[in-house]
Amino acid sequence: MQSYQSPLRDMQFVLHDVLRVSEDDVPGYAELDRDTTAAILEEAGRVASGILLPLNEVGDREGCTLENGVVRTPAGFKAAFDAIREGGWTCVDLDPAFGGQGLPHVMHTASQEAFVSTNMAMNMYWILTHGAWNAIHAHGTEAQKAIYLPRMTTCEWTGTMNLTEPHAGTDLGLMRTRAVPNGDGTYAVTGTKIFISSGEHDLSENIVHLVLAKIPGGPEGIKGVSLFIVPKYLVNEDGSLGPRNGVSCGKVEHKMGIHGNATCVMNYEGATGYLLGEEHKGMRAMFTMMNEARLGVGLQGYAQAEIAFQNALAYARDRRQGRDIAGQANGADADPIIVHPDIRRTLMDQKSFVEGARALTWWGATLIDRSHRMGDAEAEALISLLIPVIKGFQTDKGFEMAVAAQQVFGGHGYVEETGVSQFVRDARIAMIYEGANGIQALDLVGRKLAADGGKPLMGFFERIKAFLKAHEGDEELKASVLDPLKAASKDLQAAAMYFMGTAGKNPRDALAGATDFMHLMGHVCLGFMWARMAVAAKEALGAGTGDRAFYETKLATARYYAARQLPATAMHLSRIQSGSAPVMALEVTAF
């Protein structure tokens, strides 16, 4: 049986000891004092544990069913979804002009973590709506905003994103969905989209589909793609629902995980669509929400690892097998497996990843706030650089950590009664959607490194360099945490220089090393977060905190990450510098 306790103490530590949000000059941050954030996160944790977690295994077991064109969600989902809506959790950071609460994005990110951990499949219904809302808010006409946003704010109407087609995934320029002008300002949208999360369901009155399609006569390839609002039910001028539009669900996919979310094949048969933004500028409109969406998927990676870790830790404390090799006989037949070094190692791997990833993700959310609320171009450039790492590295490692948690259970992790296998299956999708992780790595190496002449990357290095210099007088941290970060950062710089020196001569060298570079940079990012957390912990201990055990644990975990994880950067650098020759050595026919 699955269990979960919201990690409130660590959440408050990240917000206030590390990020110091209430001291930041971002508009709205001054109101984020400890009492306010505690109240929000405590309530989110209560809702997650009390309402969402009990339905997690239900959703996994029952899945979604298609009956006469209607998708039925698992038992209890509708009541829980309504409780989320009524609690205001769907609109924490949305514009108050349309009914949102207007809090900073960092609080949206922080409050969603518990929901993702306890029921990732259900969380997707309103998180996808959040993304569609942002696109309409940024690119919609005043009339479109007035019609759709207030109802999507509360998730009376939900939203989707329709990109992928049976023959066109990443290469969206190959799409065949067409939008033919009707002559009255609307378009007739025809085509098939696949893998559409929350595409059809019984949780909301209407579903607002955002659909990428091509207008005949437009430019070839990706430059000819436009974005359309295609509601499930047409909307009358007074906002009431009209007749059913020409959109239907043809199939609900049977998937490895997230069974409680309806992943649909959507058929558009002359459906009435409304242009969102400009003609042939659909990708620009869609990418408005990509930084936030991919940050959210990076959160899914560590949030699933968090609940998996909690359950593995509880099992390791309870399960008795073998004797502590350095311990004394205690009269029992065996000791809890947590005494064994290899179990301790895998638990430390999980703990150090989850806590480091939380800090990185929430720091990323503050950069989004700084960009959106202050027009800070440097923050926008930095988060754009970091997004492929947050999404790609954290979902790769999040899945790995969920598997590690399953391993702690031994055979009991492979059977369904313990519930731990669901965490592995649910975590797996985060490596694939919102841009498969190989594509994230290519985006990082092919676009982000050279963006603006490499200034964002150089700025990232300068942040680390300045941090190391500011704390070089702390001999204990220098040896155990800061010097390993410095070495890892040098490996990252060497990898970047390799790409700059070889990409023009042989682009395959860069592409062959892209995933290694993404992981190398991921380790540096988490190493940087752990260094920041270690400094914050030492400051708290020096100030005479009453919670010494918490901060001492932070320091020990920081030392663990520096000693056991950061050395991986040397391995990734060596792989990168081997170039593409080992990767491309075999002819296609030799496989």
Image: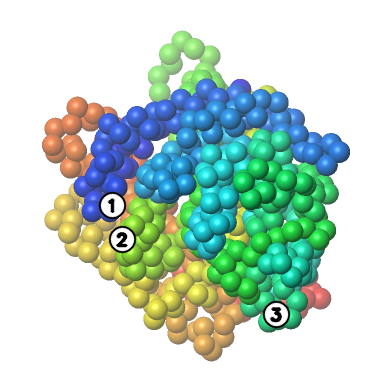
In this orientation, does residue 61 appear? yes
What crowding class fits label 1: few (fewer than 14 Cα within 10 Å), some (14-19), or many (20 or more)?
few
Which is more toward the observer, 243 or 501? 243
Which residue is identified by label 3?
218
Question: N-terminal of the two: label 2 or label 1?
Answer: 1
Quadrant housing the N terminus: top right
Q: Are marks 2 and 3 in contact (CB under 8 Å)?
A: no
Which is more toward the observer, 410 or 95? 95
Give x and y (percent) for residue 226.
Answer: 65, 69
Which residue is identified by label 1?
27
Give x and y (percent) for residue 506.
Answer: 57, 85
In this orientation, does residue 426 appear? no
Mark 3 and mark 1: Cα distance apart in space: 42 Å
Which is more toward the observer, 575 or 369? 369
Which is more toward the observer, 510 or 142? 142
Res. 374 mark:
2
Q: Amino acid at mark 2?
A: Met
Q: Amino acid at mark 1?
A: Pro
